[in-house]
């Protein structure tokens, strides 16, 4: 079993970082080699949140939450043919990089988890090369789901996959049961309103003990089209 080092992860708005921290962050992102270096320091300074992972006070990994530009944002959701509306996912998780000597120790998972915690109620998207198995494992374990189809990257010859993370999963505890409870609450509320507008239904509603029989429809559940979790 790989020994897990003591890792300290901090998240900060760029304006709270020293120029040495911004420089060190940029240095690791450039090592990844997948990002356009032109204007990178400016883009880092405009990010929402930067995450730094330290092992024995040495910077071992970085990641960030950022606001994509309109063109790039639109093209990702268009090229991936995702049915999810891009406006629902305004924040991008990116610039994830861990030093080669520190890989397979759970560092990127800690970075991603810390950023999702810092993202509050925002829904987040991320793109990853289709062959980047470690990154897919990290994203999926953090609650991201794949959406749409793989599409060619503008940089290099590889294919990219879009992933999305909805904040509702955090509010509902990220469990299927949590989401179902929220849906049932919403459905029951609608059934009561319908029942109170119609006296005949109101009587049936009361006779059923207010358990949702009044609307003449069954609550959402498995096998019901309306049971899909909200985006
Ligand atoms: C992708 C990257 C960030 C992963 O960082 P990491 O800290 O090594 O990841 P973790 O240690 O959290 O491991 C993630 C999972 O992938 C698995 N994994 C790691 N390397 C793997 C490999 N080569 N093949 C298969 N699985 C692998 C790990 O075992 C772990 O899964 P597990 O916990 O179920 O065992 C790192 O490899 C990296 O910096 N790559 C270059 C930059 C990059 O690709 N960034 C992502 C851009 S979207």
Image (spheres, helix red, strand yellow):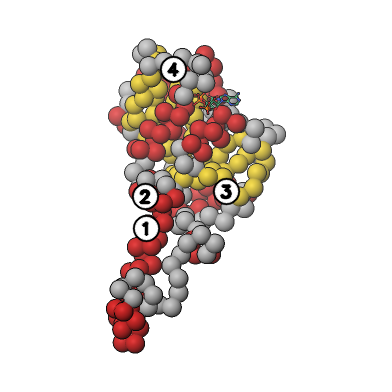
* Distance from Cα at disc 1 to Cα at disc 4: 37 Å
Looking at the image, residue 103 sits to the left or right of residue 45; the answer is right
The residue at 37%/16% (across/down) is 6
The residue at 50%/53% (across/down) is 86
Disc 1 element: helix
The residue at 70%/34% (across/down) is 157
In x, y percent, where is residue 95? 49, 31
CB atoms of marks 1 and 2 within 8 Å: yes
Q: Pick whichever of labels 1 and 4 is earlier in the sequence.
A: 4
Q: Pick whichever of labels 3 and 2 is earlier in the sequence.
A: 3
Judged from this view, the residue extending furthest toward the bottom is 200
* Distance from Cα at disc 1 to Cα at disc 3: 23 Å
Disc 2 element: loop
**Residue on which the image places disc 4:** 4
Judged from this view, the residue extending furthest toward the right is 157
* Distance from Cα at disc 3 to Cα at disc 4: 32 Å
In x, y percent, where is residue 162? 57, 44
Alpha-carbon neighbours of circle 4 within 10 Å: few (<14), some, or many (≥20)? Answer: few
In x, y percent, where is residue 18? 32, 23
**Residue on which the image places disc 2:** 172
Q: Pick whichever of labels 1 and 2 is earlier in the sequence.
A: 2
| Nearer to us: label 1 or label 3 | 1
In x, y percent, where is residue 114? 37, 32
């Amino acid at each position: 079993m790989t020994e897990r080092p003591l890792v300290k992860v901090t998240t900060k708005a760029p304006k709270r970082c020293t120029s040495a921290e911004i420089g060190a962050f940029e240095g690791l992102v450039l090592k990844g080699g997948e990002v356009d270096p032109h204007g990178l320091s400016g883009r880092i300074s405009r990010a929402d949140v930067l995450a730094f992972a330290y092992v024995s006070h040495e910077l071992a990994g970085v990641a960030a939450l950022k606001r994509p530009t309109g063109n790039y944002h639109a093209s990702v959701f268009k090229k991936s043919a995702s049915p999810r509306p891009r406006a629902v996912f305004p924040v991008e998780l990116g610039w994830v990089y861990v030093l080669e000597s520190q890989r397979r120790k759970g560092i990127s998972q800690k970075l991603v988890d810390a950023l999702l915690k810092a993202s509050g109620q925002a829904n987040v998207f991320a793109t990853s090369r289709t062959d980047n198995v470690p990154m897919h494992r990290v994203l999926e374990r953090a609650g991201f789901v794949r959406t749409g189809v793989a599409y060619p990257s503008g940089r290099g010859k590889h294919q990219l996959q879009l992933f999305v993370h909805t904040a509702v999963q955090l509010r509902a505890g990220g469990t299927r049961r949590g989401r179902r409870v929220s849906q049932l609450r919403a459905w029951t509320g609608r059934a009561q309103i319908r029942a109170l507008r119609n006296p005949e239904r109101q009587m049936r509603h009361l006779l059923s003990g207010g358990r949702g029989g009044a609307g003449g429809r069954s609550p959402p559940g498995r096998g019901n089209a309306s049971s899909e979790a909200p985006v």
